[in-house]
Image: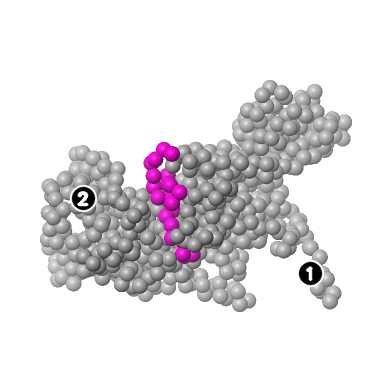
Amino acid sequence: MRETSHFVHKYLRSSKRFPHIWCAGCGIGIFMQALIRVIDRLGYSKDAVVMVSGIGCSSRLPVYVDFNTLHATHGRALTFATGVKLANPDLKVITIMGDGDAVSIGGNHLIHAARRNVEIASFIVNNHVYGMTGGQSSPTTAYGTKTTSAPYGNLEAAFDISGLVEAAGAAFVGRTTVYHTPLMERLVEKSLTKKGFSMVEVLAQCVTYSGRWLGLNSPVEMMAWQRDNSVTVEKAQDLTPDELAGKIVIGVLADRERPSYEDEYAKLTAEKLKV
Amino acid sequence: MKKERQEERPSQVLLQGNEACVKGALLAGCRFYAGYPITPATEVTEVMAKDMPGTGGAFIQMEDEIASMGAVIGASLAGVKSMTATSGPGFSLMQEHIGYACMAEVPCVIVDVMRAGPSTGLPTQPSQGDVMQARWGTHGDHSIVVLCPSSVYEFFDLTIQAFNLSERYRTPVILLADEIVGHMREGVVLPSAKDIELENRPRPTVPPEWHIPYGDPGTGVPPMPAFGDGYRYHVTGLHHDVRGYPTTRKDEVEALMRRLFSKISNDLDRLQWFDSYYTEDAVMTVIAYGCVARAGMQAVREARAKGLKVGLVKLQVLWPFMRRTITTILDSSEKVLVPEMNVGHISREVKRVNRGNCDVLTLNKIDGTPITPGEILETLEEAYP
């Protein structure tokens, strides 16, 4: 309790920006707490952290936290973040996006940020739905799911966000659910301390929309579903594709050393300035 | 000794318009450039890629123009003067972020080297079809500053001025060149860095806890800290209160809107930028801008040789519209001619402020070829009072 109140006073814009806009039972707050705990543990100065977001429920997060915060346009958080990082590489640049934000309208920026490898710690809160606009299908909505924009069931296949970002070349990729909080904190920490572009996909429940359609009527049921349907990367190695069908594989999915864009550019600049 | 003296003398260099733009930007202190290749603006990106590393600034080729403009805003918020360059299709893609920069008051410069549109249009041919898009391209009511060069030297000079105005008002400034000015080469004498006056965004002088990020200090332009300076604040494209936090309160929304307009409209006296030639006794005046002003100059010279009392006013600021300057011309001339390579973007504005005082004639060309001095001269001779 004492620890919580310490975080509230140190990191939240408590006197100014509350109550927040998230529904009761939403998973985003659990992720926000994990993020704040890890930032505190790593001892970053609040002045050195820049938090950039797009548009959507999870992208409201930066409004509530006491860092340099940039609430950008829908899908474009990574482009703003790229500018911030290259203009001042000493800043710790973090992006918060949702699934519709990062993978639909911002899909192009996501793959190029991963390929380019500018050091940005990005977090995609995936609740499989456009929550803020009232429960429309997103690129991660499962086939057949009914949504307000697919009243007869979703006709499209879902995107595997982590698979996409890993294939695009990100230095670090991890996946967790908000139920698995210790794992979530470990992945957040690895992401924040990783050289180059990192992405953690955080599966979170949207009780108001996706929960209702899945027949899961409470946050507890939805988090139990997260628990029961997740397998760790280590366990997944021993499972057949059939056994893995419908399972969420959580843990570290990619962790590799790649030169970051700003390091490569710094080398070039040093050479040019010497001449 | 001899060598030193030679270096002191300003020497003429042969430059392309797009190259001159880069030289101006770097002298103005631009240290971040993000761009995407597009004809006829590509040279700006290419020369930036070559020259920026040597200044210690950052260059990046982004995945599209939306991303370029996003990166430019991010870099400017981190305290660095930033720019991008594009042409029609890319300019369309940038519009959402230009609106963001207006709303969040992020200084930046956007160069649009106009080609003929709409859509993919004529990539290698000139036009002035983006004048209204530069004014109203992004959604919602907003104020904007748009400058227009008509020569290689002006492209250099107005690039510097574009940075100065964007820093002074904390607003995006659009530099509207055209394919002719972007691609033509001229001999120019560039001033040395010490002779150039630069403006920088106002910075807060109070401790962070006293700083009000979007408060009006009296000038309409709030001081702007850089990310990392210790003034942690919130930047958003939503309507916001003086602290920067989202609001829907009508008093706060209206106050913000009024300030965003008035910070520029209160300063219109300083934004009447034009050159006039032979206007003292002119009964007929050509009002032109960009490459068309060059043809206009030649036409006016030839008309004078034939004894016609005609003059030329060349506009350098297109938006905010120079009502005062134009009204003066309309009062002193019997007729004005506004030749444009579009269907009449500026002539519409001229007619709006005219109030029936003067005959406003138009000469519009939309076939992808430049307006020639002969065409302007012919119109002048036909319509001469």
For the point 87% across and 31% down, the residue is B307
Which chain is home to disc 2? A
Image quadrant in which the N terminus of chain B is located: bottom right
B7 relative to B155, above or below: below
Closer to the camera in the image, B243 or A125: B243
Q: Where is residue B44? Give x, y as percent.
A: 60, 56
Q: Are marks 2 and 1 on the same chain?
A: no
What residue is shown with label 2?
A24
Callout 2, which amino acid? Ala
As for residue B228 lying within the magenta part, the answer is yes
Judge from the rendering whether residue B110 lies leftward or rightward of residue A249; answer left or right: right
Q: Where is residue B120? Give x, y as percent.
A: 52, 43
How many tags in the picture? 2
Callout 1, which amino acid? Glu
Image quadrant in which the C terminus of chain B is located: top right
For the point 76% across and 58% down, the residue is B189
What residue is shown with label 1?
B7
Label 1 packing within 10 angstroms: few (<14), some (14-19), many (20+): few
